[in-house]
């Protein structure tokens, strides 16, 4: 039996947010569980949905890395992660055991890009990118209504960048690449250099220019590849006052007027509020059930 409501899961490194929604985007119920060891968290997730009745579809927007290939025996498994206990955890098994309905799975950032394209800051654009800049840096993309996935999902947080001339001595904190984007501009990379978060550093501290320079390089790199209509930057680091305008200014300099869209209009904050993660899960569930 299939219901008319959608089951939503926003799987994060510190919490899972569960929800129930209608197809029009109204969220009827929300529930939060801490991300502990997978057995505990995933059985709490399954137990909550067990009491919710039949679902039309389920959308799972998750932290990564995760296997997105539907034909893979590991579809829905978390891949190699530093998060203790979660490598190879199967996010979907408890749901598949309980529900016959379709399940959509994507990364949190791909799902956020889709939700922003549909209802938020990317409305009306064919190509929308979404970055979160926080504990890590992740990027997702929507092109003509579909989220981007190759052999695996995009890993835009790990692109290489030119160093800021006042930042040559820091090795970077990415365990795989050292000074990739995440290794240089994530929250922990900022703390590792300057001992506090960007928003706590004085407004004239060089850290602001250094972080903006790396994010602006990301903007022009993405313009060169995608020529997107919007690049949305969310996440804790982006809450730093003036950071987004510094990124725009730097991207205007670096782009040299070459690309189609002026960074002043291209680079924007997210428009969806506290329910953004659940709306991402809904957007991917809807795209699955409305596909021809
Ligand atoms: Zn890296």
Image: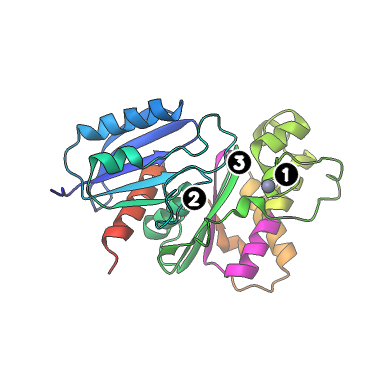
Magenta highlight on residue 229:
yes
Residue situated in front as seen by the camera: 167 or 46: 46
Verify CB contact (< 8 Å) between mark 2 and mark 3: no
The number of discs equals 3
Residue 22 % position (x, y): 22, 48
Q: Which residues are magenta?
A: 216-241
State the mark number for residue 136.
3
Residue 7 % position (x, y): 27, 43
Outermost residue toward the front? 73
Q: CA distance from mark 2 to mark 3?
A: 12 Å
Q: Secondary structure at mark 2?
A: helix
**What residue did someone put label 2 on?**
109
State the mark number for residue 71.
none
Residue situated in front as seen by the camera: 286 or 92: 92
Verify CB contact (< 8 Å) between mark 1 and mark 3: no
The answer to whether any part of residue 274 appears in the image is no
Residue situated in front as seen by the camera: 177 or 212: 177
Residue 241 % position (x, y): 62, 41
Q: Secondary structure at mark 1?
A: helix
**What residue did someone put label 1 on?**
184
Does any atom of ligand 1 lie closer than 8 Å to the CB of label 3? no
Residue at 41 percent across and 40 percent down: it is 90
């Amino acid at each position: 039996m299939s219901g008319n409501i959608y089951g939503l899961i926003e799987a994060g490194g510190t919490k899972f947010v569960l929800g129930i929604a209608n197809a029009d985007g109204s969220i009827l119920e929300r529930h939060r569980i801490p991300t502990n060891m997978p057995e505990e968290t995933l059985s709490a997730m399954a137990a909550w949905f067990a009491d919710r009745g039949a679902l039309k579809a389920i959308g799972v927007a998750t932290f990564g890395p995760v296997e997105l290939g539907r034909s893979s025996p590991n579809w829905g498994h978390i891949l190699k992660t530093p998060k203790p206990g979660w490598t190879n955890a199967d996010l979907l098994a408890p749901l598949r055991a309980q529900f016959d309905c379709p399940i959509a799975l994507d990364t949190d950032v791909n799902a956020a890009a889709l939700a922003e394209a549909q209802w938020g800051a990317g409305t009306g654009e064919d190509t929308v990118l979404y970055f979160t800049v926080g504990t890590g840096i992740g990027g997702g993309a929507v092109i003509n209504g579909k989220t981007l996935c190759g052999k695996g999902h995009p890993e835009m947080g790990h692109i290489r960048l030119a160093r800021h001339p006042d930042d040559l001595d820091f090795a970077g904190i990415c365990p795989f690449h050292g000074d990739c984007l995440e290794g240089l501009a994530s929250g922990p990379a900022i703390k590792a250099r300057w001992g506090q978060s960007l928003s706590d550093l004085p407004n004239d501290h060089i850290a602001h220019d250094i972080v903006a320079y790396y994010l602006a390089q990301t903007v022009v790199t993405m313009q060169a590849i995608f020529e997107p209509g919007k690049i949305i930057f969310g996440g804790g680091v982006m809450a730093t006052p003036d950071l987004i305008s510094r990124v725009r200014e730097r991207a205007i300099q670096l782009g040299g007027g070459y690309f189609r869209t002026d960074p002043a209009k291209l680079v924007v904050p997210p428009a969806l509020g506290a329910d953004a993660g659940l709306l991402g899960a809904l957007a991917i569930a809807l795209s699955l059930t409305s596909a021809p």
